[in-house]
Amino acid sequence: MEFILEAADHYVFNQAYAQLNGIKFLEPYIQIHHPAREFFTLFIITLIGGYILYFAFASIDYYFFFDKSVKNDPKYLKNQISKEIFMATWSIPIMVGLTVPWWWLEIHGYSRIYHNVDDYGVGYMVFSILAFLFFTDMLIYFIHRAEHHPSVYWWLHKPHHLWKVSTPFASHAFHPLDGYAQSVPYHLFVFCFPMHSTLYLVMFALVNFWTISIHDRIYLTKASFFNGAAHHTVHHSDFNYNYGQYFTFW
């Protein structure tokens, strides 16, 4: 994210912020390393990235892979896709706003992210992928299961379960606090374990692709340990199964 922030500043935001120099009360906040400027820039970058990932890849999945015959299911809601998109569209900016402090801490060296492969070697990079998957899957299981507790389910997680017959556009159609809570393990990982910066961004993007894929009802595998679209479809229809993100171990 540090390199993305620097590139965005160089090619876009330096010129944009320069236009604000005449506004006296803003001048202290738009200096190159001021936290307010960095927070705002990170917010815009993450928001644009989030919308691109959601709209581009959910649309590709929907138009080229999703079995549209499931829309005949009686549990499929009227105008469901527009409702899914509406919920995702207003939720994503809030989730982004809650996520930006993590990015800021990471680019300022408070996490264990590193930039040089030789610091830990290729072997550790491969291991960190597996560790990332298992660590985040474990925490998401417990967070997700807690969200099904009656005391919070009705306002926090039930909005996502409106989609009993899910589509790729349901992937980010969460209450924003729900979506954010389930994203926390991805950030927490790099505060507990070293991870290469580029690999971390790649894994973070792949998480979003995965989230889209498990809502598209394309059953690439029904392996009992693999929490793919087949298992997640059961979660949406029956609620009390398959709380994990990638696996069913927990």
Image: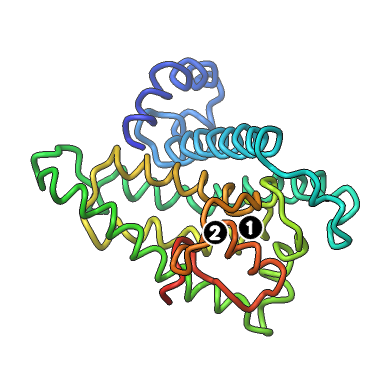
Quadrant of the drawing holding the N terminus: top left
**Does 220 sit above or below residue 247?**
above
Q: Nearer the viewer, residue 6 or 67?
A: 67
Left or right position of 171 against 24: right
Q: Nearer the viewer, residue 146 or 212?
A: 212
Q: Residues within 10 Å of mark 2 (few under 14, many from 20)?
A: some
Question: Where residue 116 sits: x, y (%)?
Answer: 14, 37
Q: Residues within 10 Å of mark 1 (few under 14, many from 20)?
A: many
**Does 192 sit above or below residue 5?**
below
Residue at figure coordinates x 42%, y 70% from the top left: 139
Specify the label residue 176 is tagged with: 1
Contact, CB < 8 Å: mark 2 with mark 1?
yes
Residue 172 appearing in the image: no
Residue at figure coordinates x 50%, y 20% from the top left: 21
Q: Nearer the viewer, residue 117 or 167?
A: 167
Report the colour scheme: rainbow
Residue under label 2, please give it: 180
Quadrant of the drawing holding the C terminus: bottom left
